[in-house]
Amino acid sequence: MMKVSRRGFLKATGLVVIGLVAKPLFDTLSRLELPQLSARLGTLTGKRLAMVINLKACLAKDGCSDCIEACHRIHNVPDFGNPKDEIKWLRTVPYEDAFPELKHEFIAKGLKGLPTLVLCNHCANPPCVQVCPTGATWKREDGIVMQDYHRCIGCRYCIAACPYGSRSFNWRDPVPFIKEINFGFPIRTRGVVEKCNFCEERLAKGLPPACVEACWEKKVLIFGNLEDPNSNIREILHLHYSLQRKPYLGTNPQVYYIIT
Amino acid sequence: MFERALVGSRKYWGLIVVLLAIIGVGFICYLKQLDYGLGITGMSRDVAWGLYIANFTFLVGVAASAVMVVLPYYLHNYKQFGKITILGEFLAVAAVLMTMLFILVDLGQPARVFNMILHPSLRSVMFWDMVVLGGYLLLNIVIGWLTLDAERKGEKPSAWLKPVIFLSMPWAISIHTVTAMLYCGLAARPFWLTALLAPRFLASAFASGPALLILFCLIIKRFTKFDAGKEAIEKVAQIVAYAVTTSVFFLLLEFFTVYYGQLPKHMIHFHYLLFGVEGYTGLVPWMWASLVLACLSLYLLINPGTRRREDFLAAACAAVFASIWIDKGLGLIVPGFIPSPLGEILEYAPTVPEILITLGVWGVGFLVLTVLYKIAVSVKEETAA
């Protein structure tokens, strides 16, 4: 009979345990999906929703805020009138703040301080989804990063993890600060996180996102499916030089900016 | 054994009443917070975490530090620590309890906290932090209580307890490592994105926790017949000396990489902390106070003449505690959010209700600690007699 020393037995057991645990643990902790898997999902759903923002065509510099107003009205976003409690799904920030790594002394005149629309980037690799302890935020197969206001425990880990400042927290009861309640969309309670949802409730009805609709004629905002090679959004990205916010973080934002 | 907590001197009951009053005030403020929302605190659109999470982080360190008296006693058979391991373990119990309460008061929807268990997400470090903290609390309650009970009966602790004690040692390291991972895995926050964070946490933990333990030993010696022994306290003081040195060394390493490397997105947060940015200097006096206190404690602890004198040692320990509370509390959490990812600066200062709730949580911790120490010291006094 083969004699197994205690030492040898422990060694073998240890190796087996490591072998069994290492791979699943790595997969669980790793944020990146396996390429084959995501490719397969892609062909199954055939959808990867994205947005292009035409920076210079945007009239925010002339005081236009149609898209922001449409978004906030439809989604019951409150207006507290102070930065401390502020909740913003869609807002403008100076160009240099949206693209801090592109900031230098001699930025082109047309770009310097240019109001730039920012919203949730619906990252292909979203860090907020990775850190959420309850699955209250997740990525749909069509790429929309969703937020469940009823599962969220309000730990704000997702806010810490978002490199774009795209998430807001309900520091207090928002209801008294909503101008006119839209009963077609949930209002939020204090203590939960919210953000842009790419108007998934409108997409389900076959409507474009509210911001895109509000800006329909100016064509500043282009929304579409990147998986469709014949889509308008693909063509625009094909023709123009485009930017993503903080691409070096590996989050792969699905909101692209073009400067024409 | 618990009945020992129900009899005591006037001073003991006086302390209990004071702590209950502090808890009561904190609780009333917490009810207000539940009603109004977390907007009652100084936290804001940009600064998503504040005083609560700062104290949480600091106290995880205090909890982890129990290993610094448990390990020499059980692993190296360093007999002098036999009398104080129980104090370390009970300190860990109270500290872990406080960390959990700080998380709870920081939640926007505390009633939904069980979603962490109902819908666990294994990719979230917060889930793992809950697991290790919960496990550590259980380990220290079981170990502390059973060893004390065995001592009371004049028996040896059950044999099965030994492996549990051994398990508690790496477990102590794990709670602070995982807590560091809450922060140091976030690419969005360059201030925390450093592999040195967990080692820094551990080094500062092994300074602040044992420093607190020394202070408690000195207080207990003054008010009861229980004396931890000069040699034990001196040894813990050496541990604190080494740990503070390591902690400051790590901090300087961090400064070097940030300031010599000159990556703007790293540098700006340290700049905010140390010198202020665009006239915003909210944390600057705090951070410099922390650095000065650290240097003072280094001087008092490294110099054997001062380290061996009880009064200087107490001052040094208080300095260590305060220095690390700042450095690892608000000094660690708040600059992570300032400036915001968009470069905006919204400063943070805790509000009065926020501070009272924080004191309330510390009150709960000290109440539990007082009761546990009362039991432990009573048992020690009986067995010594």
Image (cartoon, coloured by chain):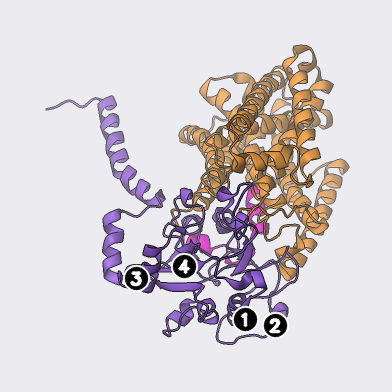
Dot 3 and dot 4 within a common chain: yes
Q: Judge the density around disc 1: few (<14), some (14-19), many (≥20) Cα neighbours within 10 Å.
A: some
Q: Amino acid at mark 4?
A: Val
* Neighbour tally class for label 3: few under 14, some 14-19, many 20 plus, Cα within 10 Å: some
Check disc 3 and give the amino acid type. Answer: Lys
Q: Which residue is mark 4?
A: A52
SS type, badge 4: strand
Q: Residues within 10 Å of mark 4 (few under 14, many from 20)?
A: many
Q: Is residue A173 left or right of residue A37?
A: right
Q: Nearer the viewer, residue B352 or B23?
A: B352
Question: Is residue B268 visible in this depiction of the protein?
Answer: yes
Query: Which stretch is magenta?
Result: B99-120
Judging from the image, what secondary structure is the residue with disc 2 in? loop
Confirm or deny contact between disc 4 and disc 2 (CB under 8 A). Answer: no
Question: On the same chain: label 4 and label 2?
Answer: yes
Asked if residue B191 shows in the view, the reply is: no
Q: Residue furthest top?
A: B305
Of residues B12 and A55, the one drawn nearer to the viewer in this rendering: A55
Query: Residue visible at 51% across and 67% down?
Result: A54
Q: Chain of mark 2?
A: A
Q: Name the residue beneath numbered marker 3.
A: A47
* Residue marked by disc 2: A179
Q: CA distance from mark 2 to mark 1?
A: 8 Å
Residue behind mark 1: A73
In the picture, measured across the screen, residue B383 lies left or right of residue B126, that is right
